[in-house]
Amino acid sequence: MVDPMVDPTVEPLAKRSTWQLALGVGLLVGFLVVALGLWLGANRMYEANIAGFARAPVGCDTTLNFDRTGEFVLYIETTGELDVVRGDCDASGVYDRTGESPAVQLVLRGPSGEVVELESSTGLDYDTGDFTGNSDRRVQIEVSGDHVLTVGPVEGAEFAIAIGRDPDDGVWLMRWGSIGAAIVGFVMGGLFLVLGSRRTVARDVEPSPWQPTAPSGPEVAEWPSGPPGFPAPPPTTGAAGVGSTPAVRPLPLPDFRPVSPPSVASPDSDPRDEQSSPWAPPRD
């Protein structure tokens, strides 16, 4: 049963503020989780790009299989590790050369033995802790297949030539997606949190019961003094004071005087005597 003295809109507003707050928190947390996942995924992609580079040791002819065409970068990698190398040497192991990148002579031959032109390249570098390198040359591979890279001997500590693309390929796309997800989460989540907070303030206000207002104006005299359908109060004739009852007029009593029986007039009686009071004593 609904209480007529309570505003029926208070409870729906309270429920609405609850789901708005819950939705705001859910959106904020959800988009932040997505943003964090994209950012961590971008870091893993960056490290995977560098770890996937082909590597050629110093003083060897290394066979490189280019399964795709396009532009590739040759990095002088001073810190890293060699896996199995295809070519005329079986160099492998960890290397860590400190100081400036050494000058090295590089010659690249295509599948038919032709020399492929190498161009100078600077501005690209990477450092993941496991691998450190700086760009030195770039090459445009127009025919896929096996190529042979000759790295001239250099005095000093060992190093290697790493061949691959820009390590940031596809990484910044995920990082921008991470930043966008964080912004969307803050905007949408914050919006619903603000809306939910406003509804909560409206819910906490105690509703006051409805009270009729007293009318004013010339039309008040025409209004009935009681609810419609009730009889009008009886008129009063006396003034009632404080703590007294109104005066009541006594009703008249009926006349109960006895009526005398008719008398027979005698011949000797005087007719005027018949007009005397019926209560007169009889004559002798």
Image: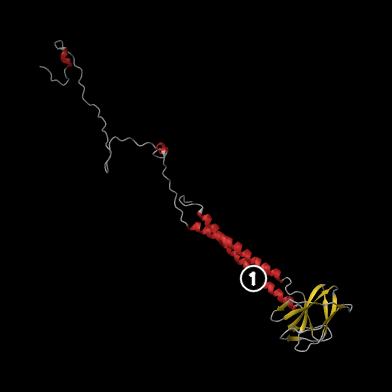
Residue 229 appears in the picture as rendered? no
The residue under the point 15% across, 15% down is 273
Q: Amino acid at mark 1?
A: Leu
Q: Quadrant of residue 36?
A: bottom right
**Does residue 262 lie above or below 180 as drawn?**
above
The x, y position of residue 83, in whole percent, is 77, 83
Residue lying furthest left: 284
Q: Quadrant of the C terminus?
A: top left
Q: Is residue 190 left or right of residue 48?
A: left
Residue 40 appears in the picture as rendered? yes
Relative depth, front residue between 164 and 136: 136
Residue lying furthest bottom: 156
The residue under the point 66% across, 70% down is 37
Residue lying furthest right: 112
**Does residue 125 lie above or below 34 as drawn?**
below
Q: Is residue 242 left or right of residue 30?
A: left
Per the image, the residue denoted by label 1 is: 36
The residue under the point 16% across, 13% down is 272
| Label 1 crowd (10 A; few <14 / some 14-19 / many >=20) | some
The x, y position of residue 229, in whole percent, is 42, 37
Q: Tell me which colouring the rendered structure shows.
A: secondary structure
Residue lying furthest top: 267
**Does residue 52 lie above or below 202 as drawn?**
below
Relative depth, front residue between 26 and 126: 126
Relative depth, front residue between 151 and 238: 151
The x, y position of residue 260, in whole percent, is 20, 21
**Does residue 259 lie above or below 19 as drawn?**
above
Relative depth, front residue between 165 and 122: 122
At mark 1, the secondary structure is helix
Q: Quadrant of residue 233?
A: top left
